[in-house]
Amino acid sequence: MGTVLSISPATKKASIMDAEVAAEGLKPDKSLKRHSMFVSLSWKKLVANSAKKSAKKVTPSVLAVPSGHVAQLNLENSRKTRQAEEKKPKVPIPVPVPTVPTQSSDAQKARVSSVQKQPSSLSLLSPRRIVIQASTGELLRCLGDFMCRRCFKLKDLNSGEVIMWFRNIDRTLLLQGWQDQGFITPANVVFVYLLCQDMIEDGVDSVGELQGTFQTCLYLAYSYMGNEISYPLKPFMIEANKDAFWETSLRIIARMSAKMLQLNADPHFFTQVFQDLKNQRESEANLDR
């Protein structure tokens, strides 16, 4: 009188089989999951190891040459250099070797005396050196004496007057600031004498004409030999010679340019003119005045 629950054996058997199958199905899944986990772990380890290797700094390996090998190379280089030098042709260096005279002393003395007696060709070619000394004042007096002797028609002319013309112009240029130092020096007096020697004629019969020509020569001497770039005309030009000043200047330039250049370039020519000027000096007793 109660209710009885009954279970059929087939049904029980089927349920049991289903449970086994389910268990068997679960087992392969677990093995697959376990295998995949191992594969992932090994892959991660491989990637980590390769990353560590790539992160390492690669340094180039330097070949260390042993010191013995370097010494051997140096020896070979020195040997090759020595062989190259030996192959070059050797030129003997000329060395003066003193010779011992084999002749007797008498023969040697005779030869020396014969050589000394022979005239030297160099002494014939080289001109004799002449030394001339004179002060500025002495040369100015020589210049004045030359002017007085050349212009013999001017009976009242004396050398002091010619010197005064020269000194007055030089002093005026100094006072007016046209020059910083005086022009009158021995060399410049010789230059003035060179111009006057050619330009002063002996037929001059007027003091004004003589002074005009002389001061024109002074103007060209200052322009050629002076220390300044230019000089004014007023101290050199006088009323009696104003119209002929430039004509006389051009005539002097045309006639005396070569000699002016030669006087500065040739010391022998300068010495000759210097000596000629110095010879113009005479005492007042010998002047025919």
Image (spheres, rainbow, N blue to C red):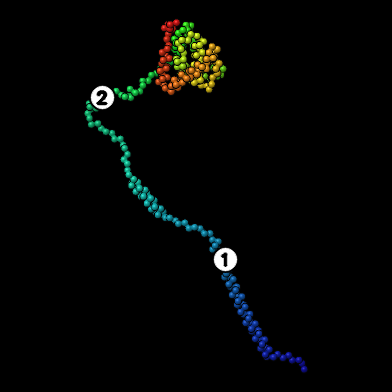
Per the model, the C-alpha gap separating discs 1 and 2 is 114 Å
Report the side of 92 relative to 222 (left or right): left
| Residue 198 horizontal/vertical position (percent) | 45, 15
Residues at marks 1 and 2 touching, judged by CB atoms closer than 8 Å: no
| Residue 30 horizontal/vertical position (percent) | 62, 77
Tag 2: residue type?
Ser
- Residue beneath the point at 56% across and 17% down: 176
| Residue 115 horizontal/vertical position (percent) | 27, 25
How many marks do you count on the picture?
2
Instruction: Kindly state the secondary structure of the residue where label 1 is placed.
Output: helix
For the view shown, which residue lies furthest in the bottom direction? 1
Q: Quadrant of the N terminus?
A: bottom right
Which residue does the numbered mark 1 point to in the structure image?
A: 48
Quarter assignment of residue 26 = bottom right
**Foreground residue, 40 or 229?**
229
User: Can see residue 145?
Assistant: no
- The numbered mark at residue 282 is none
Number of other residues with Cα within 10 Å of mark 1, as a class: few under 14, some 14 to 19, many 20 or more? few
Q: Quadrant of the C terminus?
A: top left
**Foreground residue, 204 or 227?**
204
Which residue does the numbered mark 2 point to in the structure image?
A: 114
User: Can see residue 181?
Assistant: yes
Instruction: Kindly state the secondary structure of the residue where label 2 is placed.
Output: helix
